[in-house]
Image (tube, helix red, strand yellow):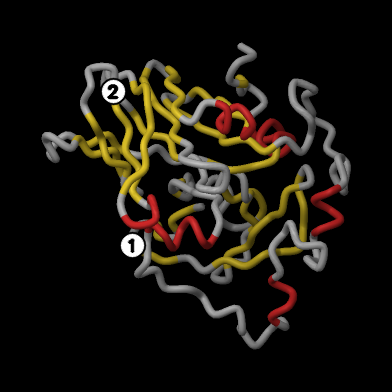
Amino acid sequence: MYSTKIDGQVFEFGTSGLLYRSNKLMYDRGTETLWRQFTGEPVVGSLVDSGIKLEVLPVLLTTWGDWLATHPDTTVLDPDTGYYPEDLYSPEWDSRSIYFSLRQQPETSFPVWNKSGRLPEKSEVLGLIVGGEARAYPAEVLQQQPVLNDTLGGSGLVVITPGDNAGSRAFQTDGQEFVTISLGGVGAADVFVSDSAGEEWRMEEDALIKISDASQRLARLPSHVAYWFGWYASRNETSVYGQD
């Protein structure tokens, strides 16, 4: 996910239908420059070498039910767009989804020459870049370790995964070591984590907030949710958590 606001100007993007290393290229409707989806950089067109790069925002891959439980006032984009029939928006795990067969096949649909066998091609990873250092966190590892402390790019971080479908969020830490996770509130929608000193923190979308002192906030880190092949092709200097 990216911010499309650059120097006060809001860019509008579309999908070009073109692929680079089996990953789509976007285009902006103002200049028709092609942009690399994985890095947010212009690669073909008048904006190449302009120094422009889209700002990465935190992303979360979760279910509607889990999101709604935590954010009951959420507004929703109507699937009746007038362009495509509503049944084309079936969930990706539904056999009626137009991309269901592509997601089930273990290999990419188109060749990707720059690969790594450290993980299966379509392993889902949470990708982080901190201090210029990239690391992939396999989804199955995050499910096994709902509170995962790590160091990347010289900074501490924690990745919190509240449940099977609730998604993972990464936060930069400041010397804290987090140990346990608990759920509370209506429908267990509130997420709390405790640090090794026994202090409790509440998880918000933009920060971890200390319960005893709300002025202490640990900011959320920008992240990518991606297939391993896509993350590696874009960040081949990446490490893999648990392997390096």
User: Position of 122 compared to 67: left or right?
Assistant: right
Residue 46, above or below 49? below
Front tag of 2 and 1: 2
Q: CA distance from mark 2 to mark 1?
A: 40 Å
- Near mark 2 (Cα within 10 A), the count class, few <14, some 14-19 or many ≥20, is some
Residue 11, image x, y percentages: 48, 65
Residue 122, image x, y percentages: 76, 38
Amino acid under disc 2: Asp
Residue 195 is marked as 2
- In depth, the one of 113 and 51 nearer the eye is 113
Residue drawn at x 51%, y 42% as measured from the top left? 163
Residue drawn at x 59%, y 51% as measured from the top left? 42
User: Position of 222 compared to 209: left or right?
Assistant: right
Identify the mark nearer the N-term, 2 or 1. Answer: 1
Residue 28, above or below 56? below
| Element carrying mark 1 | loop
Quadrant assignment, res 241: top right
Residue hosting label 1: 8
Q: Are marks 2 and 1 in contact (CB under 8 Å)?
A: no
Residue drawn at x 84%, y 33% as measured from the top left? 113
